[in-house]
Image (spheres, helix red, strand yellow):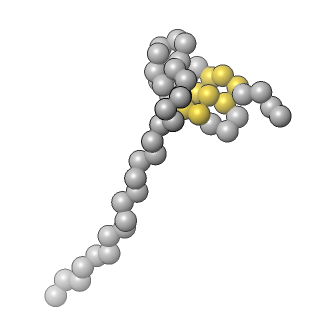
Amino acid sequence: MAEKSQEKPKKKPKAYKPASKFCVKCGARMADHKDRLACGKCGYTEWKPSK
């Protein structure tokens, strides 16, 4: 008989921060990284000030 394969638990997608910034070039929502804000659509990047 065929054995049941163990299914991995499904991951929940990360929610965007409500106060996220929008790209000045194309208007898309920017990704908030540790050291920068980056647009995945056009590649525009804003660097955060280092502490």
Residue occupying image coordinates x 47% and y 15%: 27
View extreme (top): residue: 25
Query: Which residue occupies the foreground of this view, 21 or 18?
Result: 18
Q: Quadrant of residue 34?
A: top right
**As drawn, 3 above or below 16:** below
Q: Position of residue 51 (x, y in %)?
A: 83, 34
Frontmost residue, 31 versus 4: 31
Give above or below for 48 relative to 2. Answer: above
Q: Residue at x 16, y 88 (%)?
A: 1
The residue positioned farthest toward the bottom in the image shown? 1
The total number of labels drawn is 0
- Where is residue 49 shown, x and y percent of the image? 77, 27
Q: Position of residue 43 (x, y in %)?
A: 55, 22
Residue that appears at 72% across and 28% down: 48
Horizontal side of 7 relative to 45 (left or right) equals left
Q: Residue furthest front?
A: 18
Residue located 62% across and 23% down the image = 45
Farthest-out residue, left: 1
Question: Looking at the image, is 7 positioned above or below residue 23?
Answer: below
Q: Is 37 left, or right, of 20 in this rendering?
A: right
Q: Residue 36 location, x and y as percent?
A: 66, 30
Q: Please tell me in which quadrant of the rendered image residue 9 appears.
A: bottom left
- In this rendering, position of residue 15 left or right of residue 38: left
Q: Is residue 19 left or right of residue 51?
A: left
